[in-house]
Image (tube, grey):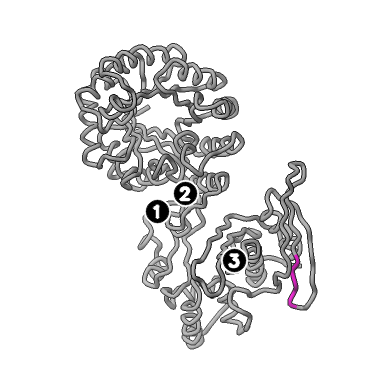
């Protein structure tokens, strides 16, 4: 591999999964492993085989079923852990054992109760043992950033002499700075005996919000492997975010002069897959994959993007697999954005009429956070339906059930009323109660769709409801957003589905029964 190639070592399934709230069963891990394979990451750290029988089984399942990336298991620097990693990795066509031991004064004295010499002896013996099991061995001196530099050189040398092919320098507690880590990698590459024969790797945590910056700075210092995780998940504040590091290298290749082999159009799909299996939604303002990453509400920005999106976008949304840039209509939006949305909806308005509509639009935007396509249709056509509720269907009944019997799937009984007075009630099954409810809403409305995201939040002190639900659904080849406030979680979630379906019907882009 050329010196301008930076390997992407993904640890979503190991360090990422260790974070509270992100634990994954084997099936979920396989979903993410397939997404990582499609991304074309170089290495998948599938887990910590010695941690539990379940973790060992998950590592083995990934090793058996995922081809392409090298499959890795973490192991503490002891024989039992290394042997467990080797057994779990047996089915993999391409494999790596990643072993580590603390080297900083704090880890030596407070945690390990070992001297410098005892640690060096372990590195020599046990890295060699790992090498006898697996040709590809990675060694990490844990808490390397707070390890004395002269001793860090000794640990790196011992690992290289024992057969390690990758030396990872972890900022275990997110303590370093970009300038410091660049200097450290330059120092190690210049002074570690045998350093020119191995790959130096960086593993940064986000405790001070600098994991991505530090990882990129390490690359500037000579690191040619970045350890990272989808959506930046990981211990405490998380790891270096895969999507942010990869797109920084791709977007600023003129500066970094290196590249990865990541299939960037697959990034968004991987991010969404992780959010779904861990039930942790992507924050709206998340760089690269957040809902707002390519969205614009401010009038000045909207005017610029409509003229040439390069005015306010440094990368294409399509480059990471997201829909094209989104003009969000809100109280900061200008007349250019409103006119563009009216035209996109295949409606029209004279300049004089547009001036009148813009005044009404601003009033509506002040009253609600976002102005939807259905709201624009209502403004232009003169419909007097309640804002956010345009469309024929109203929610009348919600019944969600999950039986204790595992053989009985979750189901929902949903009742809707049409604006012509007709009422329909349908019972549907689903993977979960909300999925079942959405299936029922679609069955009544006569549309086909799927849930992309469902966010439910408690609204403290709200006068018009204490639960806010926002559902993004795909109907046909379009996406629709439904937002409601209710006093009940179930009614809020299902109500958001109904609003989204109504918007699809009002937009005249989906045939409704």
Residue drawn at (63%, 68%) of the image? 499
Task: Considering the whole magenta stretch, tell me its main secondary structure.
Answer: strand
Would you name the residue on which mark 3 appears? 482
User: Which circle marks residue 320 in the picture?
Assistant: 2
Q: Which of marks 2 and 3 is nearer the N terminus?
A: 2
**Can residue 3 be seen from the camera position used here?**
no
* Residue 503 falls within the magenta-colored stretch: no
Q: In the image, residue 230 lies at what x, y percent?
A: 46, 42
Q: Distance between the residues labelled 2 and 3?
A: 25 Å
User: Which circle marks residue 315 in the picture?
Assistant: 1
Residue drawn at (44%, 11%) of the image? 132
CB under 8 Å between callouts 2 and 1? Answer: yes
* Left or right: residue 328 compared with residue 446: left
* Left or right: residue 290 compared with residue 191: right
Query: Which element type, helix, strand or loop, lies under badge 2?
Result: helix
Q: Which of marks 1 and 3 is in front?
A: 3
Q: 81 or 482, which lies in front?
A: 81
């Amino acid at each position: 591999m050329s010196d301008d190639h930076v390997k992407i070592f993904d640890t979503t399934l190991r360090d990422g999964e260790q974070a509270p709230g992100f634990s994954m069963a084997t099936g979920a891990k396989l979903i993410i492993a397939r997404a990582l394979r499609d991304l074309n990451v170089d290495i998948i750290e599938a887990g910590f085989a010695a941690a539990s029988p379940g973790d060992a089984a998950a590592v083995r399942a990934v090793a058996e079923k995922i081809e392409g990336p090298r499959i890795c298991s973490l192991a503490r620097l002891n024989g039992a852990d290394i042997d467990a990693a080797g057994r779990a990795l047996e089915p993999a066509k391409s494999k790596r054992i990643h072993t580590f031991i603390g080297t900083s004064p704090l880890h030596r004295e407070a945690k390990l109760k070992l001297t410098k010499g005892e640690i060096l002896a372990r590195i020599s013996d046990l890295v060699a043992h790992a090498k006898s099991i697996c040709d590809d061995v990675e060694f990490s001196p844990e808490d390397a950033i707070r390890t004395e530099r002269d001793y860090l050189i000794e640990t790196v040398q011992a690992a290289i002499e024992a057969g390690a092919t990758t030396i990872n320098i972890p900022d275990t507690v997110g303590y370093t700075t970009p300038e410091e880590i660049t200097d450290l990698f330059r120092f190690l590459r210049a002074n570690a005996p045998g350093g020119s024969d191995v790959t130096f790797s960086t593993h940064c945590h986000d405790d001070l919000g600098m994991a991505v910056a530090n990882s990129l700075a390490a690359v500037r210092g000579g690191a040619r492997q970045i350890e990272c995780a989808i959506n930046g998940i990981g211990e405490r504040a998380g790891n270096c975010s895969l999507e942010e590091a990869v797109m920084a290298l791709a977007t600023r290749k003129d500066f970094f002069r290196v590249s990865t082999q990541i299939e960037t159009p697959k990034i968004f799909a991987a991010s969404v897959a992780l959010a779904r299996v861990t039930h942790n939604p992507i924050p709206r303002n998340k760089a690269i994959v957040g809902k707002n990453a390519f969205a614009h509400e401010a009038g000045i920005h909207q005017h610029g993007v409509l003229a040439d999106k390069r005015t306010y976008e440094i990368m294409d949304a399509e480059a990471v697999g997201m829909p094209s840039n989104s003009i969000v209509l809100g109280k900061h939006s200008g007349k250019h954005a409103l006119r563009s949305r009216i035209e996109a909806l295949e409606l029209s308005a004279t300049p004089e009429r547009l001036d009148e509509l813009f005044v009404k639009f601003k009033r509506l935007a002040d009253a609600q956070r976002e102005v939807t396509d259905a709201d624009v249709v209502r403004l232009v056509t003169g419909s007097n339906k309640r804002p956010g509720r345009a469309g024929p269907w109203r929610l009348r009944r919600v019944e969600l059930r999950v039986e204790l019997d595992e053989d009985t799937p979750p189901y929902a009984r949903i009742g809707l009323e049409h604006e012509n007075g007709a009422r329909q009630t349908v019972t549907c099954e689903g993977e979960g109660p909300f999925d079942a409810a959405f299936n029922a809403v679609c069955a009544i409305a006569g549309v086909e769709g799927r849930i992309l995201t469902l966010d439910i939040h408690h609204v403290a002190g709200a006068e018009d409801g204490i639960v806010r639900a926002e559902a993004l659904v795909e109907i046909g080849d379009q996406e629709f957003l439904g937002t409601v406030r209710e006093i009940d979680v179930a009614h809020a979630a299902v109500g958001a589905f109904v609003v989204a379906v109504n918007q699809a019907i009002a937009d005249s882009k989906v045939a409704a029964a």
